[in-house]
Amino acid sequence: MEKNSTGTPKTSLFERTAWFDPIETGVRERIRGFIETMLEEELTTALGRERYRRGGEAAGGYRHGVRQRRLVGSFGPLEITVPRGRIPKPEGGTAEWRSAALPRYARMTKQAEALIAATYLAGTNTRRVKRALGALFKGAVGKDVVSRTWRKVKADWEGWNRRSLADDDIVRLILDGTVVKVRLDRKATNISLLVVLGVRRDGQKLLLAVKNMGGESEAAWRGVLDDLIPRGLRTPDLLLIDGGAGLERALASLWPNVPTQRCTVHKHRNLLAHAPEALHEEVTADYNDMIYAETSAEVMRRRRLFLAKWRLKCRGVADSLEEAGDRLFTFTRLPQSQWRSARTTNAIERLHEEFKRRIKTQTVLPSAETAAMLFWSLLASGQISMRKVDGWQTLAEPPASMHLDLVA
């Protein structure tokens, strides 16, 4: 009888001996040879002559031995032999040759650093990164390596916070805050991250700012916006907000004439908070009939019906709807193709949800700055992507200056 070729393997997948098989070892040896050949050719080009030949463009330069370097890449850790050389200086004398392919003090390839950062950004803390990548890097990645990689990410983050916005044709801003838990004075404390999304005229959403300003007050939001304007942010055509009092005051003082849309999802939650639970389903049905009506005139007609009904049935619901005024219906001033993207701040809400899902395993973040930087990194690394807004083809058309009939 023939042997069963699909039988149980002699070694378990998770036994250390199974992590690096002959194929992996052979591939790594070839990579080692390739890297050493590449460095040798780079030095040859710098010297202008092959090994053991005299003369050439860089006469006066010479080789002088080798040194051993440990390099960690997506192929795992390797011990490689790096050639050494002296290169003539224009002013006379020689200087130690430095490889452009393998920078001085580089311990990891950029691909390996990106892999570590991506694993951390996926919601894994520093200790778990070490365990998750242990098989690939043979234990070469510890907490200190993750921390060094994260410091490089921080340098990119600081550059992003200083970048110019003059070349981004922003026509719409979406503003909202989210609460995260961080460690302050050795205690877990909730903080608010203030997030600003921009929408370019071509419909692409861009993260413009994410900052901890100590709360969501008028002064906090002005601090965020006052940083964006000197960097080139132009006056937008439309503002989408959640309805927070501090944000509304900040925008009114800065751009009093820019049309503003209150998020219809946030207002729906407000309405339910003013109604007994037994009426929630009915309030939702009436509200959706109004907000998702097909024409502006129909939206206004159903608004009047909503107010007439709920003034009698539950006054708090009607008062809450009236509080929003015409800002709840600014979307009806836009081309109908834009209504879906202009009704709500869902673009930011989805980012908040994804961000919190990624940090769920970390429970408490080390600091407020780390929280903001992590939010940005998830987008910058491509872990989270944003698509164009619905109706982007008509974004060049500004909101109509029509008056909304709010008489009920």
Image: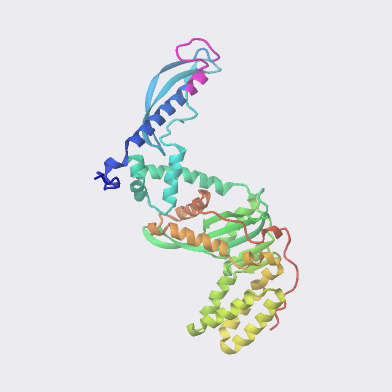
Q: Position of residue 236 (x, y in %)?
A: 68, 59
Q: Quadrant of residue 11?
A: top left
Point out the residue furthest to the bottom here.
312
Q: Quadrant of the C terminus?
A: bottom right
| 249 left or right of 15 in image | right
Q: Nearer the viewer, residue 385 or 355?
A: 385
Q: Which residues are magenta?
A: 41-57
66 vs 284: above or below:
above
Number of callouts: 0
Q: Position of residue 104 (x, y in %)?
A: 44, 30
Point out the residue furthest to the top here.
54
Confirm whether residue 141 shows in the render. no
| 158 left or right of 395 in image | left
220 vs 299: above or below:
above
Residue 4 part of the magenta segment? no
Q: Position of residue 152 (x, y in %)?
A: 46, 42
| 397 left or right of 184 in image | right
13 vs 332: above or below:
above
Colour scheme in use? rainbow
Confirm whether residue 387 shows in the render. yes
Q: Position of residue 239 (x, y in %)?
A: 64, 63
Q: Quadrant of residue 181?
A: bottom left
At x 51%, y 47%, the residue is 157
At x 36%, y 58%, the residue is 186
Q: Nearer the viewer, residue 318 or 229?
A: 318
At x 61%, y 67%, the residue is 248
Q: Nearer the viewer, residue 50 or 232?
A: 50
Q: Quadrant of residue 304?
A: bottom right
Point out the residue furthest to the front here.
1
Q: Quadrant of the N terminus?
A: top left
